[in-house]
Every structure is written in C-alpha cells, then in structure tokens.
Amino acid sequence: MTQIIAPRVRTLVLLVLAVAGALLAGAAPASAHAALTGSDPAQGAVVDTAPTRVSLTFSEPVAVGDDSVRVLDPKGERVDKGDPANPSGTTYSVPLVSGLPDGTYTVAYQVVSADSHPVAGAFTFSIGAPSETTVSVSAQASDDGLVGWLYGFGRYVSYAGFAVLAGGAAFVLACWAPGARVRAVQRLVVSGWLALTAATLGLLMLRGSYTTSGRVGDVFDLELLGDVLQTKTGAALVSRLLLLAAAALFIAVLFGAYARTADAAPDHPGDGDGGEPDKRDLTFGLALGGTVVAAGLAASWAMSEHASQGLQAGVAMPVDVVHLLAVAAWLGGLTALLVALHRAPVETPVGHDAVRRFSRLAFGSVVTLALTGVYQSWRQLGSWSAFTDTRYGQLLLVKIALVAVMVAVAFLSRRWTRRLADARGSAAAEEAERAEEEKQPAGTAPATASETSETSEAGKTEAGHDAVRAAQLARQRAATEAARQKRLRDADPNRFGLRRSVLAEAGVAVVLLAVTTVLTQTEPGRTEQDARAAAATSSSAPATGQGSGAVSLTMPFDTGGTNGEGVVSVDLDPAQAGDNALHVYVEGPDGTPVDVPEVKIALTLAAQDIGPLPVTPDRITTGHWSASGVQIPMAGDWKVEVTVRTSDIDQVTVSKNAQIG
C-alpha cells in the first residue's frame, strides 16, 4: 500500500542513483568481517629453519581465545604452546615448541571478528621440504554445523519478531486505534514479543558454541556462557532482554488502558468527538515510549554487528537503527494489516482511512529504506564490481529486486484501496450492505427454532446429557457466527482484492526478511575483495628460504569461435614439490587482459603415472585467475595442460612441459 505518486518516484529514483554513483565512485577502504591478510611464515612457504612462532595478521582487530590458533605437525599433533598474543595492532602470534623436525605443518585459526561473526580458516607451511600430512585444511568451521544453522534460524526469528512487535504496535497507534481491542491483532503483537524474547535467549545460549567448538553439548556450558556475557555481543543480547521487559509493559498499556479508551466508531484517535485530553496524552505517551523502546531494541543489533565496525561507525550505527525501524514499520505494519483484513470482526472493520494512513506510513518507510540502504551498500561494497563479484553483492541485488516487487504489488493494493473508498461512499454500496444485513437473521431463523426444540428435548434427559447438548449448541452458534462474519467480509469484492494483494506483499516480505538475515551473516563485499587481493599478493611473493624457482609458461590458443584467439600464461611458484601458488593470465591478440567463461588446469607426470591432477583457479580480476596451495607430490618433468573456454561450445586445450623441483 505504498502511496507512491509518479513524480515522487522519478525524483526518488534519480536521487538514489545520483547519491549511489557519487558514493561508490569515491569509495575508500573499510572492512567489517575480519579477513586474514598475511602470515609469518607465509601460506605455502618452505623455510630453512624451524620458526619460533607463527603470526597471523587480520584486516581488523579480532577476539582470540586459548584455542583460536592451532599449529599441527604432519601427524596432527599440536606444536603450539601458550595463548595467542597480540604484539601489535591486528597481528596475533602463538609460540611454537623448539626443535621441530622437517615437514609440512598446518595452521588452523578460528577467531571472532569485531562485528561478532566467527572467522575460520587454515593453511600450511613447510620446514626444510614439504611432506605428507594427515591434517585436512578444510575442516568444518564452528558456524557450519547444526549449531550454526540454529543460530542463523534464531537470528531470522529475532528479526521477524522485532518487525511484528514494533510494526504491529505502530500500525495500531498511527493507523487504526480500534485495532487495540481486536483479539487477533493483540495475539499478533504478543506473538512478536514472545518470538523475539525466545530467540534472544536462544542466541545467548548458542553464542558460546557458535564462536568456538560448534558442538551441541557446549550450548549448556555455563563457563562458555559466562565468557559470552563478557563480550560485546553478549552485552547486546542482555540489553535486548531488559528492553523486552519494558516492551511487555508497553504492550500491557496498549491493550489495556489504551484499548478501553479506543472509540469503536472512528478508526483513529481524534477522528470523532472524543478528542479527550487524557486520551491524547495516553496516545502521545505510548508513541514516545514505544519509539524509545523500539529504537533501543534496534540499537542492540547496530552496536554489535556490521554497523559497529569499519568506515564511519559513529554514523553507521544511527543509520542502521533508522533502517531497522523503517523495516519494522513497513513489514510489521503490513503483517498487522493483513491480520486485520482477515480476522477483524464485522463490528470493527478496517476502514479505508486506516489503510490510507498505513499507505503514507509505508511510503515514508520505503523512502527511508532507500536512503539508508544506499549508505549501507556503499559501506559494505565500496565499488560497482562488488555487486556481481562478491556473494554479499549478489545477495544485495536479490534484496533490491524483492523490494521492487513489493513496491509493485503495493501499487495494486493502492488501487484496491481507492476502489474501496469509492464503494463506501456510494449509495448503491450502502443499500447492498443493508440488504445483506436484513437477509442474515432470516437465514438463521430455522437454526434458532431447532436450537429451541433441542433445548426443550434436552430438558427431559439426564444432567450429563444436558451438558453435552449445551456444548454442541455453543459450537454450532460459534461456527454460524464465524461463517456469517466471513461472508460479510468476502461480500465486498474491493476488500477481497485488497486482502489478496496484501497477502502477496506479505509473502514477498517473508522471503525478503530471510535474505536480509543471510546478508547480516555474510562477509561484506569490501572485505572479501580485500582478502582476495591480499591472498593474491601473498601467493605471488617469494616464499622464505626457497630461492627463485618460479616457472612461467606462455601458450597461444584459438578456440575457433568469435574472439577465440589469445594467449594464456601460467606462473607456478616456487615450482617445487609441495605447496605451490598458481596464477593464470589470459590476454587477447592485442595484449590486453580479457575474461573468458572458464579456465581449467591439469598437471600430469607421465614418467611416474601421476595425474592428471585437476586445478580450478578462482577469478581475481579481469584476465587473472589464481589458486593457492596447489600440491605437487614430487619433482619431475610435468605436463601443464590449460583448457580455455570462450563460449558455451568453443574451447581448446593447450599444453607445455615444465621441470618442477
């Protein structure tokens, strides 16, 4: 029901595009999720002598615990000692036992970024020469199992509960005062409060296991819970619980004293003759108190997640609060309107004035979401390429598309609202409504006579049989009344059409909220791109103590299709047995970097009947692919095959031999 007028829409779209272009064009570095940007020894390095410690450098400060950094020998035994130290800034180090033998060692880390999300990973380095290792570098992170799934579900429920709680209350106060006396609306808002409270308690219990072991048994570890309470996220969850106690008092007043003052005739305070000072004061007090409580609840997310870290955190947190409030007003109010249209009794209908008030509220929420969303996108992405090159950007595009669909459906809802208003104002509609009311008692007369007969007959039976009959009659009367009210609600085609369009909006809103929840748990585009660049720089840097043994191969190719000619180059560093960094560059005939749909590598050592060993590099930038940790089991004359695909059907495989090791 977003009341959008065409000139306003054009102005808003132009404003959003202009601001987005200016912000994204001049983006500066920032981060939110932490990312590993360097290590000593470097990933894949082969060092001559055993190091005394391993150091990790992240893109931002992180929280570390006793087991946050583990160093494992080729047999999987731990060789680190002591707790991780923070010698400087964003670098964390752990000491190693002395006298480590030659071989390949695995470094596994699991830390918590400043925006509350666990960050895990692993890499290897070698002493003397690479060796076989029993340790897998792709171990499951704490947020990948059942606990991670439950934590994500809890976050979704908490967002949904907040939207229903805050948005439903706002709908009653700002749009439809008689809704405070409607049982279905009361149940909706109370359900939002219960869902948010239960989800917050669940997140508090899950938090310790979510950021450490990921084991279900650790959910009830009181020591872990105590550690969580000392963190920023734990404090935010406890603050949310305290604010929910204040929200319970707000709900009691809203559906108690305020509901008793809500006049049944007008559908908004101040519309009728009853503009009593006490009623106005109560409405103002509830609006002010509710806004403060809702803003505090929204701040419990802003102070502990993406907005609290990175560029302009002091501005980003208030913007995030406003963004969440706008989401709640729109989606929660929409849910309350849907319930009112389907469940409100005939005696307390949702008037077209109430729908129009919500239309204005929704329009203001959409404008607010657009402005705050542009700012948040700039902070988390930083460039246009991040929209398509990162998972965060791709999810954001899906979210934008869903919002556009909701706005489109809102246009339909607005048309039904206008028709509903016209129908209510016409004499013919009033005549039809009166006729329907007059026909209803006649239709129920036979049932009433039957009830009288049954009651008379029941008086001749035993007292126990009497009670059963009375219960049956009560159920019949309730079913008859429910059917009557449904017929009256469905009799108006305009109201029925409005209900269907609002239901469609609500369905899209459920999916939109799910995408938003996933976004809050996804590494921002800025950080993902920074981490890729750091990994590429680290991979291309010479490894300590190994000399310059890099191999570079250049091979022309021609797939036979349009724009199918070019040159592919493969760089392998250090070109020795063990871990290697591989870089692939594709250029056109004029020497400029070009992108192709797919590049694959295969390594074969025919003399030892080894291979082909497949390698699928990741795209770094235009014409550049990279893969780290490429394992070459032994030295020899290796055949390097490169498959280049330039279209759905055009591809070619070229190869060269290289002496490795």
Image (cartoon, rainbow, N blue to C red):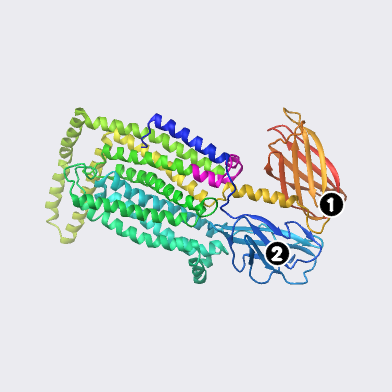
Q: Nearer the viewer, residue 172 or 215?
A: 172
Q: Please say if 236 is above or below 541.
A: below
Indicate the position of residue 426 as horizontal and vertical percent values. Answer: 21, 28
Indicate the position of residue 291 as horizontal and vertical percent values. Answer: 34, 52
- Is residue 432 toward the left or the right of residue 514 in the image? left
Which residue matches tag 1? 549
- Whether residue 134 is visible to the viewer of this picture, yes or no, is no
Indicate the position of residue 240 as horizontal and vertical percent values. Answer: 41, 60
Q: Which is the main secondary structure of the residues drawn in magenta?
A: helix
Residue at point 41% right, 46% down? 327
Q: Which stretch is magenta?
A: 374-392
Residue at point 59% right, 61% down? 111
Residue type of the residue flagged with mark 2: Val
Which residue matches tag 2? 54
Q: Is residue 157 magenta?
A: no
- Is residue 67 toward the left or the right of residue 241 in the image? right
Residue type of the residue flagged with mark 1: Gly
Instruction: Check the picture and name the quadrant holding the N terminus.
Output: top left
Q: Is residue 375 magenta?
A: yes
